[in-house]
């Protein structure tokens, strides 16, 4: 069951039980809906941005599995105070960590707390759960109202 | 103890030896396969027959004048006869070879439906249908201006008492019913429903994808007009299925897809169409797949559909008892007449997480909306975990499932 503990690390279980930045944000500047049609997971993300495209506040809402809920929660913690470019660069790194060769060690120090999702790499069917919130973030940062799907 | 009971009631260990997949381990554990409602495993006889057909008898069918083609044609048509016997159709010509139940339903929608449905006509379905028995009718409604009317569910997953009869009217031009719900396990009282529909003059299509693997089907006794079956769910290969239709209805239906095999004569001025069933079977079919499916239904006949239904019912009772005893588990779908399917929720754990954790125990279940999103909406849930059983499952499989659920609770409880 070691693989299971790799997938469901304590930090992930904690963020699933008590997601941070959960709810909605009045007077948000941007929002996007994310949807994983395969499992029915749904997510709404609402952002406030300043003039430099820096996220000053954000909330997420929706129903999902532990991996998608914890990923959204940790992403919102990370994104607060970051610029659009910083967030998009980290999204790429996060995606690389999840889709890399499971047998190769990868350096994830730069991802900080987000590295707890490294175990998801062993579970290809669950990668989309972890990336749903990041895809939704990318859509929200791109502007406008939209629905992003993982398919 | 369960070993002894298994042997007394049904020799499930002998059955399992017919299915080579059970020699596998998953994540280092014996495979506990509880996803047969999605797609069933294959007996060695089916695998062997398809290989021997490709090795020794393969050729194009219905064309060649040479011996090999005659042999292949004979084997293919022999399989059609077996499929007719499997559901007790009066005539093998009433069996149309398709890719699966989905295509069988689309065929009826696109041929019979387009010919007979008009603006404001009604197609009556139920809230428990699989998307395959919803979307083809919605597409037809968009095209013809007909309306989809839906029989609602009770909390236990059975149809609301009296609702079907109340919604049937002279506007009802077709009734399309799932025999068994893939998401809830509910077995619908289709014989009575078919009689009620006929009394209103409406023909009835039965989506039998979830019933044919578990119950003896007799289309003449049911008196249904169409019956759709997927081969891969009745222990045959994937990519083949069939549609039963009453011969007089099929005879009057326009073709489905155009191409080779389905014609009588072709000229640029006028093409005439072949008789049933060839009219609906354009192009070269999955010949080996159909022959493999014939062997699968022979295998089921050999085990006996009544013995299969009895064993699966015992598994359903055992699993229901085990899962009901766990406080955090809620079973969705508790109709009195149920096939061996258990959709469930665990408090605090999403079905997707349940699926991943059970997988670590070697247990394969389905997690998701089961292509029945209206059912999920009815219960206000995004998804369920679903354990579905076939006659090769054992009580030990259910014990492993129970242990797996306890390990979900350890992580998420």
Image (cartoon, coloured by chain):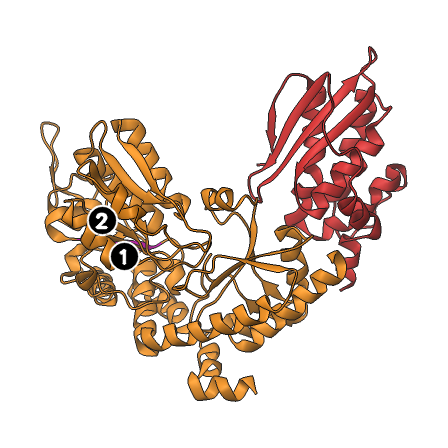
Chain colours: A red, B orange
Q: Residue at x 63, y 69 (%)?
A: B402
Residue at horizontal 77%, vertical 51%? A119
Q: Position of residue B303 (x, y in %)?
A: 35, 78
For marks 2 and 1, give the CA distance.
Answer: 10 Å
**Residue B74 left/right relative to B340:** left
Task: Check whether the beta carbons of the residues at disc 2 and disc 1 lie within 8 A of each other.
Answer: yes
Quadrant assignment for the N terminus of chain B: bottom right
Residue B70 appears left or right of A50: left
B341 in the magenta segment: no
The total number of labels drawn is 2
**Which image quadrant is residue A128 in?**
top right
Residue A77 can be seen, yes or no: yes
Along the line of sight, the residue nearer the viewer: B1 or B292: B1
The spot of residue A104 in percent (x, y) is: 80, 51
Q: Residue at x 73, y 16 (%)?
A: A27
Are there few (<14), some (14-19), or many (20+) residues within 10 Å of tag 1?
A: some
Circle on res. B204: 2
Chain label for disc 2 = B
Q: Residues within 10 Å of mark 2 (few under 14, many from 20)?
A: many
Q: From the top left corner, tell me how far across and down residue A18 is, in percent.
A: 79, 43
Q: In what element is the residue under mark 1?
A: helix
Residue A9 location in percent, x, y? 81, 52
Q: Secondary structure at mark 2?
A: strand
Specify the quadrant of the image occupied by residue B323: bottom right
Of pointers 2 and 1, the one earlier in the residue sequence: 1
Disc 1 designates what residue?
B190
**Viewer-side residue, B294 vs A69:** A69
Residues drawn in magenta: B240-245
Q: Residue at x 48, y 77 (%)?
A: B16
Magenta residues, dominant SS class: strand
């Amino acid at each position: 069951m070691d693989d299971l503990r790799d997938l469901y690390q304590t930090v992930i279980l904690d963020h699933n039980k008590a997601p941070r930045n959960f709810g909605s944000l009045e007077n948000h500047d941007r929002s996007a809906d994310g949807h994983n049609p395969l499992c029915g997971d749904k997510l709404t993300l609402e952002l406030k941005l300043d003039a430099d495209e820096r996220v000053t506040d954000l909330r997420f809402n929706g129903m999902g599995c532990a991996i998608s809920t914890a990923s959204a929660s940790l992403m919102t913690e990370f994104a607060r105070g970051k610029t659009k470019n910083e967030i998009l660069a980290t999204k790429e790194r996060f995606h690389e960590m999840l889709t890399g060769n499971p047998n190769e060690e990868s350096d994830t120090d730069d991802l900080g707390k987000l590295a707890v999702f490294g175990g998801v790499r062993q579970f290809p069917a669950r990668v989309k759960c972890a990336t749903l919130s990041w895809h939704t973030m990318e859509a929200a940062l791109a502007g406008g109202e939209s629905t992003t799907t993982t398919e | 103890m369960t070993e002894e009971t298994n042997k007394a009631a049904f020799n499930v260990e002998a059955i399992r030896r017919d299915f080579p997949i059970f020699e596998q381990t998953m994540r280092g554990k014996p495979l506990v396969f509880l996803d047969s409602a999605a797609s069933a495993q294959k007996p060695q006889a089916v695998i062997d027959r398809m290989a021997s057909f490709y090795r020794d008898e393969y050729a194009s069918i219905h064309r060649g004048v040479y011996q090999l083609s005659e042999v292949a044609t004979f084997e293919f048509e022999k399989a059609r006869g077996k499929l007719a016997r499997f559901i007790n159709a009066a005539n093998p010509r009433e069996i149309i070879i398709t890719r699966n139940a989905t295509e069988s339903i689309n065929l009826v929608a696109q041929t019979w439906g387009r010919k007979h449905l008009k603006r404001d006509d009604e197609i009556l379905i139920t809230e428990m249908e699989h998307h395959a028995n919803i979307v083809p009718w919605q597409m037809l409604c968009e095209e013809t201006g007909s309306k989809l009317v839906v029989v609602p569910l009770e909390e236990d997953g059975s149809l609301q008492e009296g609702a079907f009869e109340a919604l049937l009217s002279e506007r009802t031009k077709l009734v399309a019913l799932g025999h068994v719900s893939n998401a809830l396990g509910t077995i619908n009282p289709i014989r009575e429903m078919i009689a009620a529909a006929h009394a209103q003059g409406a023909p009835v299509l039965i989506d039998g994808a979830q019933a044919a693997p578990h119950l003896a089907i007799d289309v003449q006794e049911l008196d249904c007009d169409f019956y759709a079956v997927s081969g891969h769910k009745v222990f045959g290969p994937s990519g083949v299925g069939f549609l039963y239709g009453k011969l007089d209805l099929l005879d009057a239906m326009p073709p489905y897809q155009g191409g080779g095999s389905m014609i009588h004569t072709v000229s640029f001025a006028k093409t005439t169409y072949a008789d049933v069933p060839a009219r609906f079977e354009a192009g070269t079919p999955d010949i080996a797949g159909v022959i493999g499916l014939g062997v699968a239904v022979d295998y089921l006949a050999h085990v006996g559909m009544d013995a299969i239904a009895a064993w699966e019912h015992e598994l359903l009772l055992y699993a229901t008892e085990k899962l009901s005893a766990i406080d955090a588990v809620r079973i969705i779908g508790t109709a009195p007449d149920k096939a061996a399917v258990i959709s469930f929720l665990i408090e605090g754990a999403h079905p997707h997480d349940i699926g991943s954790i059970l997988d670590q125990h070697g247990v394969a279940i389905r997690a998701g909306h089961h292509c029945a999103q209206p059912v999920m909406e009815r219960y206000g849930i995004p998804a369920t975990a679903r354990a579905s059983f076939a006659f090769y499952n054992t009580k030990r499989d259910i014990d492993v499932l129970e242990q797996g659920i306890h390990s979900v609770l350890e992580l998420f409880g």
